[in-house]
Amino acid sequence: MPEQSTEPSSSSPLAEAISAPPPDVDTSVLHRAIAASALGNMTEWFDYGVYAATLTYLTHAFFPGSLGSIGTYLGFAISFALRPLGGMVWGPLGDRVGRKVVMATTILLMAGSTALIGALPTHAQVGALAPVLLILLRVVQGFSTGGEYGGAATFMAEYSPDRKRGRYGSFLEFGTMCGFVLGSAVVLLLQHLLSDTQMQSFGWRIPFYLALPLGLVGWYLRSRMSDTPVFSEMQGEPVAKQTAGQRFVELLRNYWPPILIMFGMVIALNVVNYTLLTYMPTYLQGTIGLSDSSATLLVVIGELVMALFIPVFGRLSDVTGRKPMWWGSLIGLLVFAWPLFLLMSHGFGWAVVSFVILGLLYIPQLATISATFPAMFPTPVRYAGFAISYNVATAAFGGTAGLVNDAVVRHSGWNLFPAWYMMGACVIGLIAMPFLKETKGCSIRGTEVPGPDTAATRIAQLAHAG
């Protein structure tokens, strides 16, 4: 990989910046950056939580015919088809004009399209136009999400101190899980306050409307932040004058190894993620006969436990490294997914236990995303590298997880298929792991691929030692 071609000259402003000790970020500024990233991410995943929790109501409203829940899962999966395109547009743009501008734009698109879903007419009112409108809004969501997640993780990583990137970066995923929990909890509350007829009539719309005020708060926080110190250091360098298109070409030409490594890791990450957090309510209703509210309650309990442990594993990764977290999670899921799905079939109590254990086995991956993935690329192509790699794999395997699981279980009766699907994805992740570079404590400043032997890391280590 020709990293030396992007190194700044010894007399350049960037070289002088990197040769200086890492700048101290004011604690209040760091906390605002964390809040801006996490709240926006919470808004994004609030939608996914609501969509999963209201799936049976959405099926009744938009796909009452023979497609049934397959149609609703198709609506979920199709939004992911636009995520790679969103990553290809927003990622290079974020590397060119800055992280915060793109993040402020994507959160408005996400919140607005989510709120509009709540205002859509149903199939009974306008016929086939209803599912078409739903899918169009899901497409807008997918396009905006293609830039949202990579931008938020990059923003968080570049603001965090090198030795605490796992700790602070984990709060982005804490926001993710809180979004899922909030979406599911709002639906659960409405299920207890309203009758099933009321939920099918208008109650399912209410959670979607709530995305708008959440998005506006996130936009306000993001628009008031300065861009990251790491990005700002690079301005004035020749590389900063590259267009978004040139950065895209540079990424594909010189950084395909980390793209492939991340692709394998994200397959494992997101097959597990979307199987547990979006497909599970439908699975539990169909296999052990749980009611809508019981299935939602089970997922909320599991998500709350997972959220509580995200900062724990994030902080632990600053001590042990990112790779041990991933090795342990992937091997644990590979070994225990099948017996835990077997146990899940024995009723609500055992289903809760199984879901929580699966969630805790998965969390070491989720908690370290913001510390691991942005550090796989240098600053000039970091946003694009993350956004494109992550979203292509997510579109192909994450967004389709519910659709694949539901189709196989419904048509074959093989209730343990989701366990084996997760296990297969973990095998792919394990194949990628030996090629991942450990970046615990490494600096992500400059134009080199981060690692223990970069100039920025050596300078940072000397500064800490002094």
Image (cartoon, rainbow, N blue to C red):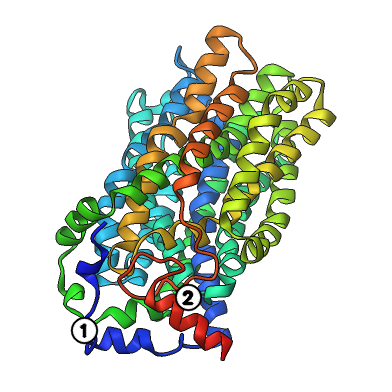
| Left or right of 13 in this view: 63 | right
Kind of element beneath mark 2: helix
Tell me the tag on residue 455. none
Place of residue 273 in the rendered image (x, y in percent of width and height, measured from the top left): 56, 40
Which corner quadrant holds the C terminus? bottom right
Query: Within the image, what quadrant is residue 406 found in?
Result: top right
Cα–Cα gap, marks 2 and 1: 20 Å
Q: Is residue 25 visible?
A: no
Give whichever of 13, 52 is nearer the camera. 13
**Farthest top residue?**
412
The answer to whether residue 140 is above or below residue 347 is below
Q: Which mark is residue 159?
A: 2
Q: Identify the amino acid type marked 1.
A: Gly
Q: Is residue 312 left or right of residue 1?
A: right
Q: Residues within 10 Å of mark 1 (few under 14, many from 20)?
A: few
- Residue in front for this viewpoint, 232 or 431: 431
Residue under label 1, please give it.
236
Q: What is the secondary structure assignment of the residue under circle 1? A: loop
x and y percentages locating residue 9 in the rendered image: 21, 82
